Image (cartoon, rainbow, N blue to C red):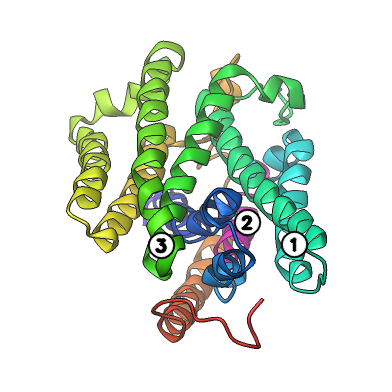
Amino acid sequence: MTPELLPTIWFALLGVLLTGYAILDGFDLGVGTMHLVLARTDEERRTSLNSIGPLWDGNEVWLVTFGGALFAAFPIAYAATFSGFYSAFMLVLFALIFRAVSIEFRGKMKSSAGKTAWDVAFSGASALAAFLFGVAVGNVFRGVPIDDAGEVRSSLVEQLSPFPLLVGLLTLSLFAMHGTIFLHLKTEGELRRRAGAWMGRTFALFALLFLLTTVATARTVPHAFDNLERYPILWAVPVLNLLAVLNIPRAIHLRRPGYAFVSSSCVIAALVFLLGTTLFPYLLRSSPHPDQSLTIANAASSDTTLRIMLVIAGVGMPAVLAYSAVVYWTFRGKVRLDEHSY
C-alpha cells in the first residue's frame, strides 16, 4: 500500500459524508428557509415542520460523523479549521441549536404570537446555517491565510469577503430549491400547490447565482482549474453538474417532482465532488504562501490510525445507511397530522 493511498481513501470518505449531509440536511434547511414563504396557516406550518420532524436529527448524524472523521483522519487540518473559523462555527452551532429548539418549542405555544415568533426563529436559523455553510466552503475553496505554525490567521470580517458571501448565497438558494421540491413531494392541498409554484422561482434564483459564482470563480480563484487541466477527464464532473442543473426545470415542466428532487440531489453531489477534485490534494490551501498549505499528506494521522479507522468505518457507515433507510421508509408518503405531531 503506497503512503498516499490511505489519506486519499479518507479524503474520499470525507467527501461521501459531506455529500450525504448536504443532500439530506440540505432539504431540511431548505424547508426551514422557505417556511414563512410557503406555509401561511397554522395547519400548513405544522405540516411543514412535520415533513422534516422525524428526519432532521438523523440527517445531522452525517455532519457529526464528518466532524469525527476529520478529527481522527486529519487532526492538524481539524485543529486549524476550528481555530481559524471559531467565531463562524459558533454561529453555525447557534443556528443549528436554535433550529432544533424552535421545532420543539413552537408546538408548546398556545398563542398565535408565540407560534409566529418560533416560526420566525426556525426560518431564520435554517437560513443562517445554510448561508454560513456556504461561506465556509467559499473560504476553503478560495484559500485561507495559514502561518508557518499551521494556524489559520483570519478574522470573521475577512471571512465575509465578496466571494465567500456569493458562495453562501448560492448554497442558500440551492437548499431553498431542494427543500421546496421536497415539501412539494410531502404535502397536499394549497401548501403543495404553493410549493409547486415556488420550485421554478427558487430554481431561477439558484441558476442566476450559479452563473455568477462560476464567473467569479474563473476571475478570482485561478487555482480552481489546476486539476482539471492536469487531468482532463475530470471535466466530466462540471459537465455532469451542468446537465443535472438543466434537468431540474425539465423535470418541473414535466410535472415530475420526484425526478426534480433526484436531479437537485445530483447537483449537490456534483458540487461537492467538484469541490473535492478542485482541492485535492489540499485540505486547506494557504492563499498567501502555498508552501504552508495543509495537504492530505502533511495533515494526516499515522497509517496505523487510518487503518483502524477504516475498520470502524466499515462497520459504522453501513449502520448509518441502514438507520437512514429505515427512518425514510417508515415516514414515507404524505404528511398526516395527528395528536403526536408538532
Tell whether label 2 touches label 1 (CB within 8 Å). no
- The tag on residue 67 is 2
> Mark 1 or 3, which is nearer the eye?
3
| Residue drawn where x is 32% and y is 28% of the image | 227
In front: mark 1 or mark 2?
1
Q: Return the residue found at the far top.
A: 219
Q: Which mark is residue 192?
A: 3
Label 2 and label 3: CA atoms lie apart by: 35 Å
Q: Is-magenta flag for residue 67?
A: yes
Tell me the distance, in whole angstroms, between the alpha carbons under discs 1 and 2.
Answer: 24 Å
Q: Nearer the viewer, residue 75 or 246?
A: 246
Depicted 182 relative to depicted 251: above or below: below
Rate crowding at label 1 as few (under 14), some (14 to 19) or many (20 or more) other CA atoms within 10 Å.
many
Assess disc 3: are there few (<14), some (14-19) or many (≥20) residues with their C-alpha within 10 Å of its C-alpha.
many
Q: Residue 316 has which mark?
A: none
Q: Secondary structure at mark 2?
A: helix
Residue drawn 42% across the image and 38% down it? 275
Q: Earlier in the sequence, mark 2 or mark 3?
A: 2
- The amino acid marked with disc number 1 is Ser
Q: Is residue 260 left or right of residue 117?
A: left
Q: Earlier in the sequence, mark 1 or mark 2?
A: 2
Q: How many numbered marks, from 0 up?
A: 3
Q: Is 279 displayed left or right of 105 in the figure?
A: left
- Would you name the residue on which mark 1 appears? 102
Highlighted range, magenta? 60-76
Residue 216 drawn above or below residue 194: above
Q: Residue type at mark 2: give it.
A: Gly
Across and down, in percent, residue 212 comes to 40, 21
Q: Secondary structure at mark 3?
A: helix
